[in-house]
Structures are given as structure tokens and as C-alpha cells.
Amino acid sequence: MVQIRVSPKIDGVSGWFATSPDHGITIGKSFEDDKDFDFVIIGAGFIGLSLAHRLAERQPDAKIAVIDALKVGEGTSGRNAGFIIDVPHNVDGGKTTPDHDRRLYALNKFAIKRLRDFKDHYAISCDWQESGKYMAARETNNLGNLNHFAAQLKNDGFDYQDFAGDDLAKRLGTSYYQRAIYTKGNVLVNPAALIRGIAKALPPSVSLFEQTPVTEITYGSKHVIRTACGLITAKFIFEAGNIFNSEFGYEKHRLAPVYTYASLTKPLEASDVEKYFSNVKPWGITSAHPAGTTVRYTPDHRIFIRNILRFAPTLTTSKDDLDFALTHHRRSFENRFPMLSHIPFEFTWGGMIAVTLNQNYVFHKPAENIMVLNGCNGVGVAKGTYLGFYAADFISGDNNEEIRFIRENSHPSFIVPDPIRSLVARYRLKKEQAAAGGDL
Ligand SMILES: Cc1cc2nc3c(=O)[nH]c(=O)nc-3n(C[C@H](O)[C@H](O)[C@H](O)COP(=O)(O)OP(=O)(O)OC[C@H]3O[C@@H](n4cnc5c(N)ncnc54)[C@H](O)[C@@H]3O)c2cc1C
């Protein structure tokens, strides 16, 4: 029997959740009498919900439950920056090969198509924008990373455009950046609205229980899952609880819990839009430095800022951490948009990322009737979608080329235990963030 000591909490109100349609309604069912399932999925993020949809397609007679401690969209899948990334953006020089990159690209494109199909079929209103993305640098020191990225794209055979100076400033509405590499296949969304739309579209064979934290699991030929609302039994359990999977007993020394934080301004005033953004389309920027700032200009004329990486072995964050992040967000915002210093932030929040050292993820079946899925790093919208989809196919008996590739890359490297893990992680994050300079 495994007792779960820490379950997810809401770390500041996510601007995406608060501005998503129908965010006040409960999507899931209330806890009912029939609590015996073929499959139970813990976690209603991109992994868990993608898995639930595919499992229902593959095994239409199976009884499936998805359980989440929070409302759908309040977890990390609804708290991220909303980039659905197609080209692998490995700016820190990790090892890749053209063949590996092209396979990842194919999986990402597959995930984007799957999400687009959900959006179209179920008319999900999530500000879906096929706007591509800029990887941008302000600091001369970080231009090398852009060169590295451009060389990787060229080598892999992916299209890109290189913008600098006035050309770039006109596209962005700010002259803060020196140069950017633009790739066109990235999609920008309100991620909370998207994940909630996907949850609403679950078929009748899937029971969704929101605000139902799992507090204890007794593994066996039939697992017994204790939740805050009562007991559930399952023949098979999928653990898709992001970093909180570490509480369920099967993941040791492969993942680092890292918090990062985001803020969303109020909508810009009409006069500011007219003056500074009249010909600017919504855009998204990731930083040329791995610890730099992600920025978006949204369709409803808000600015989104994400930065600060904080190692969080207790799996929690505090009001002080949110305040610290907010101070940094304000600085990053005003540096990039000094003419908008009168625009306040409306929302600031934190979210947890399960980081692996070698960009591999967890796609692991530690026992005949248990599967653990995790470790999406900062690209879980696309990655979570394809990992969930192929986990359902794998469990249903498939072993195709995609599943083989996924399994080959599901070996996160070993992370030393605490206290050394904490010391090394904190030192590295501090060093990286200092090195980002003006790109933070
Ligand atoms: C600020 C920020 C910006 C990011 N930007 C991007 C981006 O632009 N693009 C991108 O692709 N990725 C981004 N990411 C990463 C991405 O959000 C994650 O990789 C992705 O959401 C992981 O999905 P998941 O399904 O594994 O986990 P989650 O979305 O975290 O889902 C896991 C669910 O499990 C539930 N859970 C956990 N424990 C329990 C329990 N005991 N009982 C019941 N339920 C439980 C949680 O409540 C949660 O809802 C960002 C992350 C953050 C924090």
C-alpha cells in the first residue's frame, strides 16, 4: 500500500483558466455507486486525456475512469505557455541526429493534427492560432544558440526564416530583440480552454472525476485506489500525474521537479493597440537561452510572460515564490515594452514541470497491469498528446515503429538522490538564469 503525501494544489490563478469559456462549470461526474473499472487513469492532463480518448477508441467496451485532484485545466496542462511545438527546439546543445529530429517532428505533427481534429470536430473555442513561433535573442552572447538552432534546422531539412532589426521589430511591436529564427508550424492556444474542451468531448465509456485527489493505492491483481471521495477498483492503472507520479511508488531518481511561473496582463488599451500593434499579428517567442523568458502577444491583446525556474523537491510553491516571480515578470515585461508600463498584470501563477536530464520521458510498464507516463519537460502539449495516444495502442497490443521509437527514448538518465540532487539543481538553475542576461 502506498500513501500519497503530497497532491497538487492551485498555485496562483492561471490566466488561461480564468479566461477560458465555461471555466465555472464542473465537467466531470460526481462520485457514483459504480466504482469498478477496467482502466483507471490518474491525471487529466494532456497525457491522461489523450490516453482516455484513444483507449475508448481502441477498447470501446472497456470501462475507463480518469481521476484528477483539480478541475480540468487547473493542472499544468492548463497553466503552460500554450505553444504546441512542431520542430524540436534543442537550444542547449543536447545530442540529436537528423533522423531522430525528423521522427520527433513526425510525432509532434501527428499530435498537432490530433489536437486540431479535436478542436474542429468538437468546436473547441481555445484561440487556436497557426502562427508559428520565434526563437529570439537580445544578448549577443545568446546569438550562438540561434546559429546552432538554425544549423540544426538546415541540417534536418526544416524551413525557417531569419529576422533581425526593423523587420523583426515590425512583426513583434518591440525592438527589444536583435534577431530571431521563425518556424511556421508551431500552434499557439489557450491551453486551459483546449484541455477542457478535450475533457468535455470524452465518450460515455469514460467517467471523469474532477477534484478527487488520490490519497492511497494498494496494488494487486485488482488495484484499490482510495480517493478523497471514496474507493475505486481497477484491473489496470495508468499513472499520468506529472511529477506527482513520484508519490505513487514507481519512479525513483529519474525526474527533477521544477517550478516555473507565468503572468498575463490585462488587455492592452485600444489606443496602445492602435499605436504599437496595429499591424502586428498574435505571436509567441521562446528564448534563445534555455533559462530565458517566453513571451506572447495574444489574440485578445494581452502580453504573457513566463520565466524563473525553481527546483521544488517538496512539490509545492509558496506565496513568496509567486511574489518573487511577479517582480521578475514585471521587469521582463517593462524591459520589452517600456511604452506599456501603465498596463498591470491581471494573473500570476506557477506550474510544475517534470524535468529529465537527457530529454527522454517515462513510458514504462513496471508490472503487468500498471503503466507510468511522465517526464514531458517543457514540451508536454504535443509530447503528452502522442505519449497518451501510443500508450493506449501499446496496451492494446500494438508494437509499431512509433511505439518502438518512443520506447527507445524512454530512458531518463539517473539523477543522484538528495541532498546532492537539490544542491546541484539549485546551483545549475541559478547559473543558467544568470547566464540568460537580458534574455531573462
Ligand atoms: C508555466 C509553464 C509553461 C509551459 N509551457 C509549455 C508550452 O508552451 N508548451 C508545452 O508543450 N509545454 C509547456 N509546459 C510543460 C507542459 O505544461 C507539461 O509538460 C504538460 O502539461 C505535462 O502534461 P501531463 O499530462 O504530464 O501533466 P499535468 O498536466 O500536470 O497533468 C497531471 C494531472 O495529474 C493530477 N494529479 C497529480 N497527482 C494526483 C493525485 N494524487 N490525485 C489525483 N490527481 C492527481 C494533477 O492535478 C494534474 O492535473 C509548460 C509548463 C509550465 C509550468
Image (tube, rainbow, N blue to C red):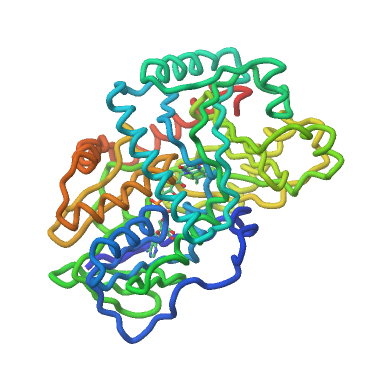
Could you tell me which quadrant the N terminus lies in?
A: bottom left
Q: Is residue 337 left or right of residue 111?
A: right
The quadrant where residue 129 appears: top right
The residue nearer to you, when weighing 216 against 19, is 19
Residue at screen point 48% across, 28% down: 290
The residue nearer to you, when weighing 313 against 346, is 346
The residue nearer to you, when weighing 3 against 89, is 89
Q: Residue furthest front?
A: 121
Q: Position of residue 62 (x, y in %)?
A: 24, 71
Q: Is 350 placed above or below 175 here?
A: below
Q: Residue furthest right?
A: 271
Q: Is 439 placed above or below 197 here?
A: above
Q: Residue furthest bottom?
A: 33
Residue at screen point 35% across, 68% down: 214
Q: Is 416 placed above or below 159 here?
A: below
Q: Is residue 83 left or right of residue 252?
A: right
Q: In the rendered picture of this protein, how many numbered marks are placed on residues?
A: 0
Q: Position of residue 410 (x, y in %)?
A: 24, 40
Q: Position of residue 55 (x, y in %)?
A: 28, 61
Q: Is residue 138 left or right of residue 385?
A: right
The residue nearer to you, when weighing 402 against 30, is 402
Q: Is 261 placed above or below 203 here?
A: above
Residue at screen point 55% across, 32% down: 133
Residue at screen point 40% across, 81% down: 31
Could you tell me which quadrant the C terminus lies in?
A: top right
Q: Position of residue 2 (x, y in %)?
A: 25, 65
Q: Is residue 246 left or right of residue 213?
A: left
